[in-house]
Image (spheres, rainbow, N blue to C red):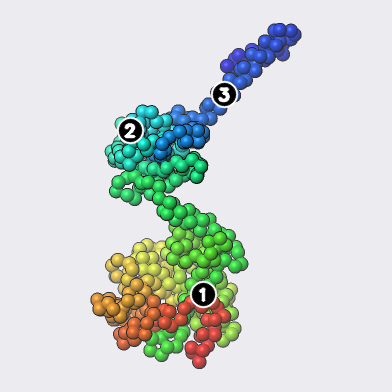
Amino acid sequence: MLDRFQRLAASLAGGEAATGPLRRQALDDLDAVVGAYAEARAALGQFDHNTLLPNRHRFLLDTARQAGERGEPTVLLVTLAEAPRYNEMLRALGHAFADDFVRAAAAIVRDIAPADCELYHVSLLSLCFVLDGHTCDTALMAATMARAFTRPVQCRGVPVVTNVGVGLAALAPGREGTGEVLRAALAAAQDSRGLSSGWSRYDRASDEAQRRAFTLLHGIPDAIASPDQLSLHFQPRVSLRSGRSSSVEALLRWRHPTLGPVAPGEFIPLVETTALISDVTAWVLEHGLSQLAAWTRQGVSPVLALNISPNNLRERGFVESLRDATDRHRIDPARIELEFTENALTTAEPQVRTAIAEIRALGMTIAIDDFGTGYSNMNYLTRLPVQILKIDQSFTRTLWQQPRQQLLVRGITEMAHALGLKVVAEGIETQEVHDLLADWGCDEGQGYLISRPLPPAEFAGWYAQNNA
């Protein structure tokens, strides 16, 4: 086609067909060649270069046309591998092998799919086809597909173990576009990896939870930069003997501009899976110490407890940032208590142990938060420079009605005291639980019976009145 185009162009330029019917014929021929070339390019743009299967663009065109013609159209999507595993394959065996793997897996999908179904290659690792729910048992087809990939995919004589996802999503014309159905099928395929059946039907609730999680993660940088999204509330801790307060825990709050208040238990675990945790911790540290400095000028001088992520202990320069922050705000490090979850301290990583030792060397206190929620060897209590053990609220909230939990909490208190640790009970909500813990010698407590988390100004007033 290119040779013909060049010959026609040369003849027109050279005067060979400069006038009359020959020129008109040459121009018509040139238009035909250009049109054929454009059609060829458009066709190529609708096929995957590796498998030569119709691609996502073609899928969207075809399903938009055919959706209304089918009885109960359902998209079955197969994701051939998880991205990390595919990247390992690329690194170890190269792109050519990875392309061969995709073609081999696509052949398996093609063999199982009904013969009258067009197979589409809609992304690097995803293939799909549309089933008619009136004529095909979609659940049986999905189960058959998942079962086929329990065996390794043979590629160049190498058995490749995959972890495919198989998802089903209904195609409903008029309610959602075919692109949305493709996304729903992919969400179902991702969900299927956690199921014994190996396949999953689209679950709107699960999908909405995933999308909400993405929205929250995406909103964290803006929240940090905003003057009014993130805030700290402060929950007092009191001596169970005297009732006086000498410590307060800073608790992060987030009011999302569209989702409203978001609980820390929802967004903190998400943030801890990303590098954003460094920025969130830096925000909490800066605003917490700034507030502590302001209280100090007012004559209010509690110890401030801050929750720190385990990932912070693995950051280079984290301990130096603590030192710089206390110096900048002129805070005595002895007035700072850092709370780490039990799981963070049981990893026994050298980097973690070193960071904890350096924090103690600064003069700060180390506390184990949510003690009892980890299921690990407690030998770490004898090896790490910990001063405070905080019993998780799941033990204390129903303590009055749970004799076996009473034995456990009393035993934890005695063990901690024998190790020279102070014991703090979280989640005290009734006077009966308060009195039990006090009788057992628990040192301090916090919870709704004592005080809810308070805004900074309210805490200052509560602190002054409580300790008057």
The answer to whether residue 324 is left or right of residue 107 is right
The answer to whether residue 75 is left or right of residue 410 is right
Task: Please tell me whether mark 3 or mark 1 is closer to you in this view.
Answer: 3
- Please tell me which of labels 2 and 1 falls first in the chain: 2
The answer to whether residue 364 is left or right of residue 146 is right
Residue 338 at x, y = what percent? 45, 73
User: For residue 29, which quarter of the picture?
Assistant: top right
> In the image, what residue type sits under mark 3?
Glu
* Residue at left offset 34%, top offset 36%: 136
Report which residue position mark 2 lands on. Answer: 112
- Please tell me which of labels 3 and 1 falls first in the chain: 3
- Identify the secondary structure beneath mark 3: helix
Report which residue position mark 3 lands on. Answer: 39
- Identify the secondary structure beneath mark 2: helix
Q: Is residue 242 placed above or below 277 in the rendered structure?
A: below
Residue 323 at x, y = what percent? 52, 71
- Please tell me which of labels 3 and 2 falls first in the chain: 3
Q: Nearer the viewer, residue 324 or 231?
A: 231
Q: Marks 3 and 2: CB-CB under 8 Å? A: no
- Identify the secondary structure beneath mark 1: strand
* Residue at left offset 42%, top offset 79%: 447
Residue 322 at x, y = what percent? 51, 70
* Residue at left offset 51%, top offset 56%: 215
Task: Kindly give the residue lying farthest to the bottom in the view shown.
Answer: 468
> In the image, what residue type sits under mark 2?
Ile
Give the total number of marks visible in the rendering. 3
Q: CA distance from mark 3 to mark 2?
A: 32 Å
Report which residue position mark 1 lands on. Answer: 233
> In the image, what residue type sits under mark 1?
His
